[in-house]
Image (cartoon, coloured by chain):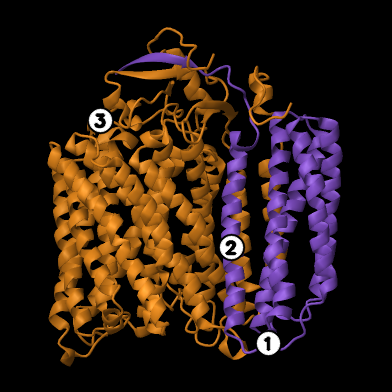
Amino acid sequence: MSPVDAAPPATALDPEREARLALTWATPPGLWGWLTTVDPKEIGKRYVATGLVFFVLGGLLALLMRTQLARPESGLISPDRYNQIFSMHGTTMMFLFAVPIMEAMAVYLVPLVVGARTMAFPRLNAFSYWVYLAGGVMIYVAFLLNIAPEAGWTGYTPLSGPEYSPGKRTDIWAQMVTFTEVAALAAAASTATTILKLRAPGMTLARMPLFAWAMLVTAFMIMLAMPAVMLATSFLISDRLVGTHFFNAPEGGDNLLYQHLFWFFGHPEVYIIFLPGLGMVSEITQTFSRRTTFGYPLLVLALLAIGFLAFGLWVHHMFTTGLPHMGNSFYTAASMTIALPSGIQIFCWIATMWDGKPRFQTPLLFVVGFIITFVLGGLSGVMLASVPLDTQVHDTYFVVAHFHYVLIGGAVFPLLGGIFYWFPKVFGRMPNETAGKWSFWLIFLGFHVAFFPMHLLGLWGMPRRVYTYPSEMGWADMNLLSTAGSLVLATGVGVYLLNLAISWRRGRPAGPNPWQAGGLEWATSSPPPPHNFGYTPFVEGRQPLWTSGPHLPLMDGLSLDHREVLLTTVSDAAPDVREGSPGPTLWPLLTGLATTALFVGSIFNEWLIVWLSIPVTLCVVGWFWPKPSHTSKVGAPERTPPGALA
Amino acid sequence: MSERLVGDLSRLPSAGFSTHGLWFWAGMAFILIETTGFALAGASYIYLMNGADAWPLDAPPPALGWGTAMTALLLISLAPTMVLSHVARMRDLKATRFWALVVGVLNGLALVIRGFEFTSLNVRWDQDAYGSITWALMLLHTLHLVTDFIDTGLLTVFLFTHQVDTERFSDVDDDAFYWMFVVAAWAPIYLLVYWAPRWLS
C-alpha cells in the first residue's frame, strides 16, 4: 500500500500540533537567533532588504551621473571620480542588486510555492547571504576610501590589467565578483534541489508553478554561467598579483580571451536577471486576470528555450572586435532567434489578460509596464543584433538605452510588481493601493523620460562612460530631459519604498489570501509560520487553491518534534523519503567570515590564499561534523532505504 | 479554507541513497559547476594555443613520467571506488571501512604524485601564457584532489569513530561518486597538459 492510500479521516487543524511544529522550526530569539537562523524566510527577507539597499545606492550613483551630465562641460564630478561612479553603478546593479535580489525572492518564496517546509540546504542559503553581504560591504568601504573600481562593470583588459590600472582598485572589484558569484552559486544549488526534490506530493513537473519553473531554469543558468566570470576575474587578478600572462599579449596572452569568458557569463547574466521576472509576471498575470495562464506548456518551453539560447549569443557583445563573417552571421541569427520565445511569452500573457477579467491593481500595472518597456527594449535588441548597426552605435548611449529598457523593463518592473504582490504574504499587511499606483506611474513615466532620449543621443554619437561633453555637440537638451526623467523615476521609487515601509507596520491586515490567488503559498497564514505548512499539501492542479476548491487535500506523517522534510521524485513528485533538516547554527556565519578573510587577504598577498584556506577548511569541517542522524532521532525506517542494495 | 487528509507519510524511509537523498543533488550541483569551470579552462587553453605561433611558447613540453603515473593511479583507483560504492549501498560496515581506507590511501598517493608533477612541468606560471594556463589547469584539478582527500579522509575517520547508519553510508556512496568525477575530469586535462604540446605544436 502506498503512503497515499493510507488515508486517515479528515481532521481540522489542531492548535497544539501547530504549536509543537512552530517550536520545532523556530529561530531562537534575539541576536543569537539572527546570527544562526537557517529559516529561508528570515534569510530571504534580509537578502531582499539588502538587495534593495544596494538598489538605492546604485540609484543614487546614477542620479549623481545624471546630475553631472545634465549640462555640458559640468565640473561637478572629476573624471577619476566619475570613472569610479559609473563602475560602481554597474557593478552594484548587476552583482549586488539584480542577481542577488532575484535569488533572494526565490529563497523566500520557492519553499512556499512548492509546498515545502524549508529549502534543501538551509545552511547554504545562510552562508550565501553572509558572503554576499561581505562582498557588498567590502566594495562600498573601498568606494569610501577612494579605491573603488574604475574600469567599468565589465573590467575589460588591458584597461583593467596591471599596466593601465595600477593600485588595488581592480583587485577589489575582481574579488567582489568572486564573493557574489560564490553566493549566487550556493543559492542556486539550494534552489534547484528544492524545486527538483522538495515539491509537494502531486506537484508533477507539468503542474509546477511558473515562478518555480523560471527559478529552476535560472538556477541552472547560474551554475553554467557564473564559473566563466570567476575564471575571468581569477585570471585577471593573478595577472595583476602573481605575474601570470593570460591577458598579456607580448607573452602569448590574449585580451579577447577575457571578453569571451566575461560575456559567456555576461550575456546569460541578462537572462538570469529577467527570467525570474518572467516567473513573477506569470503569477501576477493569472492572479489578477482571474484565470489560469494561457499557454502554460508554451511558457515553460519558452523559458527552457531562452535558457538554452542565452548561451549562444555572447559574441554579439564583441562584434566590433573583428570576427569572421560566419561568426557575425551566426551570432546575428542566434540573437534574433531568442526574440521568438520572448515574443511567445508576451502573447501568452496578453491572451491571459484578454480572456480573463483583469483587475488593474498595482502588481498588474507593473506587468503592463513591463510588457510595454520590454517589447521596446527587445526591438532595439533586434536592431543591435545587426552587425552594421551595432558597429555604428557600439559604446554609445543607444546601447545604454537598450540595456536599461531590457533590464529595468524586463526585471525591475516585474520585481517591483512581485514584491508588492507577495508583500502581504511576507508581512501579513496590505501595501497601500493608491500609493502603489502613484509609484507605478511615476516610475513608468520617469523611466521613459529618462531613457528614451538616450536612444537619440546614441544615434547622434554620444559615447557612454564619458564624464562630460562639449556644448557644441548639441546633446544638452536631451541630457537635461533625461536627468529630469531620472528624478521623476527616483521619486517613484521613493514613494514605492515609503509605501512598503509604512505598510509594514500600519497596513491593513491581509489574511492568508488577499488577492484570491491559486498558488500554494496562499494556503498558509500571512506571515507563514516557521514550518510553512501544518500538513503537507497534496497538489491536484496547477493552481491548487483554485483546482481543489475549498478542500485542499493534505498529507500527515512528518515529524512534529524533529525538523523533517519530505523528498519526492523528480518528475512525478511521488512521496519518497523523509529526511532531516538542520537547525540554527553559527557555522554558515563562521565559514562566511573565514571565506571573507581569504578573499580579502588574497588581494594583498598571494600566500594568504594558502594560509587562510586553513580556517575555511576547519569551518567546513565543523559545519559537517557528524551529528546524531535523523534515523536515530525518528527511529529506523520500516522499509529498505531506496537506492540500497540487498 | 478547510482541509481533508488524504495520506500518511510517517512510514516512508528516513534516508535514501543516490538520487533519493538530498546530498547527492548537492554533489551533482557542484559537479555541474566544476565541469563548467574545467570546460572553460580547457577552452581557454585551446584558445591561447590556437593564437600562438608555437606551443609551448618557449619551453619543453612537460615530462611524461609523473603525469602518466597519475593517470594510471587514478584509473586504478576507480575499481576500489566502485567497490566502496557497492558495499556502502549494501550497508556493510566492515567492508565499507576497509575499502574507504584503500580509497583514502590512493587519494593521498595521488596528492604525492601531483607534487612531483608540478616539478616536471618544465615551465613556471609567470614565464608566459602557456605556463600560466598550464598551471591553471593543474591547480584547478589539484584543488579537487585536495577537497576529495579531506572529504574521504574525514568520512573514513567517522566510519571508525561515530555511529554509522544509512545517512553515513549514503555520504560514502556520494563521496565515491565525486571521486569518479575527479578522475573523469583528469582525462581531458592530462591530454591538454601533456599531449597537446607534443601533438599540436
Q: Do the residues bearing badges 2 and 3 touch, measured as CB atoms within 8 Å?
A: no
In three-dimensional space, the C-alpha distance between marks 1 and 3, rounded to whole angstroms, equals 68 Å
Name the chain letter of the residue that bears numbered label 3: A
Q: What residue is shown at x 27% (from left), y 46% (from top)?
A: A281
Three-letter residue code for mark 3 = Ala
**Element assignment for label 3:** loop
Q: Can you identify the residue that label 2 sits on?
A: B37
Which numbered mark, 1 or 3, is in the foreground of this view?
A: 1
Name the chain letter of the residue that bears numbered label 1: B
**Element assignment for label 1:** loop
Q: Is residue A108 left or right of residue A460?
A: right
Q: Does the rendering let one see residue A166?
A: yes
Image quadrant where residue A448 sits:
bottom left
Q: What residue is shown at x 37% (from left), y 47% (from top)?
A: A214
Q: Which chain is orange?
A: A
Vertical relation: A564 (above or below) A411: above
Display colour for chain B = purple
Q: Quadrant of the C terminus of chain B?
A: bottom right
In three-dimensional space, the C-alpha distance between marks 2 and 3, rounded to whole angstroms, equals 46 Å
Q: Can you identify the residue that label 1 sits on?
A: B57
**Mark 1 / mark 2, whichever is N-terminal:** 2
Q: Can you identify the residue that label 3 sits on?
A: A510
Q: Is residue A587 left or right of residue A82?
A: right
